[in-house]
Amino acid sequence: MSLTDLLSDDARRDPYPVYDRLRRSTPVLHDPRADLWMIFDYEGVKRSLHDHDAFSSSMAPAGRPAPEWFIFFDPPRHTRLRALILRAFTPGVVAGLEPRVRQLSRELLDQAAPRGEMDLCADFSAPLPMMVIAEMIGVPVEDRPRFLRWSDVILKLSYTLSGGEAAERASQEFMAVTAEMREYVAGLSAARRAAPKDDLLTRLVEAEVDGERLTEAEILGFLQLLLVAGSETTTNLINNAILSLLEDPAQLARVLAAPELLPAAIEEVLRYRSPVQWMFRATRRSVQLHGQVIPAGKLVLPVIGSANRDPQQFRDPGRFDIGRDPNPHIAFGHGIHFCLGAPLSRLEARIALSDLLSRARGLRLATDAPWEPRKALHVHGPARLPIRFEPGERATAAA
Ligand code: HEM
């Protein structure tokens, strides 16, 4: 068993039977070909995510560029940057985005819904988070296409494993885009310093902790991280919610009858079909886990998607139950790197799904063909999701 076995289209559509088998037999598994260690059980995954003395985030698979993103930093560098960024990315800022998210969601549905069919990805779940991120940062409307192109290139870093021609090409394209973005962000930051606006970029250039500010390179790194961390993931959350509800008519009927269940349903989608299936860590020293010894300096893959189906933690984990309580999933990670965008993606998913479910009556998949997995290897969800429905009225009540 190796990582590549988990990367076939079939395995990526439904990795759960393999996870179940490996979690039982070898919760800590060495892949000799890639010389990496995979962790499949809840406690082990949780430990590797939060125990930063033993597991470092500061790594990049060999042959890949190591982007200067604070998600890959350890304390104390990570602590300093996260504190500065949190000054700009506050709960109030996220809550303030709600009316705009609602408006964007409705505009997208206004275009697609009257047709009675759409590709949920292309028409709704992909553009929505991207537009929200661009607006939040304060990217002028005319520059949005550039941002879209940049985010496509950055995301390509996760289309391949390390080594090989495709990885090399992705890395070169990334470096070219970084140079382009550096110039652009420097210009826009200077404009915000001269004339502050009510946007994230202004708050980032103004953020200060103990007399320290973010450097240009740190702001650029954060914006690059936001482009990929903030869009692809939420797209999958929305898609996976619709997929899971359409596969289980009883659960769909339940949420339609009691829309107040939607937040719990979103948590269950995060657990049942985790949008981010795995992260990377590297051992700082040799680490003992479940009777195995992972040597120092090894690449580790905490498999979040498997941890969230661990029967030691979740009763009947293969059942999609939108009322599951408690639901201590770790889809947003755990510990000092816990997802900064969790409140935003929950907000986006709640608005998007409530809009869609209230306007698209008789929602169904337009094809029985197995869905094609998305290209980024660490995420889980369909690349396209054609759906049909009877167009309904635009909802007027608040979701
Ligand atoms: C369903 C949607 C999302 C999922 C499943 C998700 C998942 C994750 C996970 C698992 C981590 C932890 C990484 C680690 O421990 O190494 C993380 C970190 C992060 N996420 Fe998210 N994310 C989502 C949405 C977002 C959004 C919308 C944003 C921004 C707008 C965002 C920004 C970040 C950032 C900046 C970090 C790094 C935090 C740090 O290192 O301290 N994410 N995310």
Image (cartoon, rainbow, N blue to C red):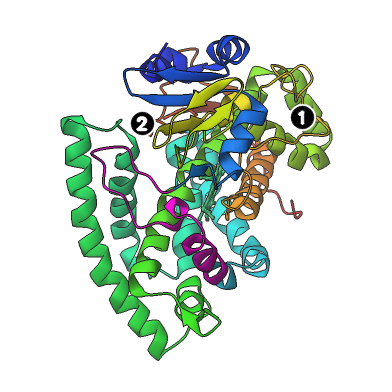
Residue 234: name its quadrant: top right
Disc 1 residue crowd, few under 14, some 14–19, many 20+, Cα 10 Å: many
Is 196 placed left or right of 102 in the picture? left
Is 280 placed left or right of 64 in the picture? right
At mark 2, the secondary structure is: loop
Residue at image mark 1: 322
Q: Amino acid at mark 2?
A: Lys
Front position in the image: 89 or 196 = 89
Front position in the image: 259 or 200 = 200
What residue sits 46% from the left and 67% below the top? Answer: 137
- Is residue 141 part of the magenta span, yes or no? no
Q: Is residue 259 above or below residue 321?
A: below
Q: Amino acid at mark 1?
A: Ile
Q: What range of the chain is rendered magenta?
A: 58-84
Quadrant housing the N terminus? top left
Residue at image mark 2: 375
At mark 1, the secondary structure is: loop
Residue at the outermost bottom position: 194
For the residues labelled 1 and 2, say whether their Cβ atoms are less than 8 Å apart. Answer: no
What residue sits 29% from the left and 78% below the top? Answer: 187
Disc 2 residue crowd, few under 14, some 14–19, many 20+, Cα 10 Å: some
**Residue 125 seen from this side:** no
**Picture coordinates of residue 18, whole percent (x, y):** 53, 11
What residue sits 27% from the left and 33% below the top? Answer: 162
**Picture coordinates of residue 215, whole percent (x, y):** 38, 75
**Residue 228 seen from this side:** yes
**Picture coordinates of residue 112, whole percent (x, y):** 49, 41
Q: Earlier in the sequence, mark 1 or mark 2?
A: 1
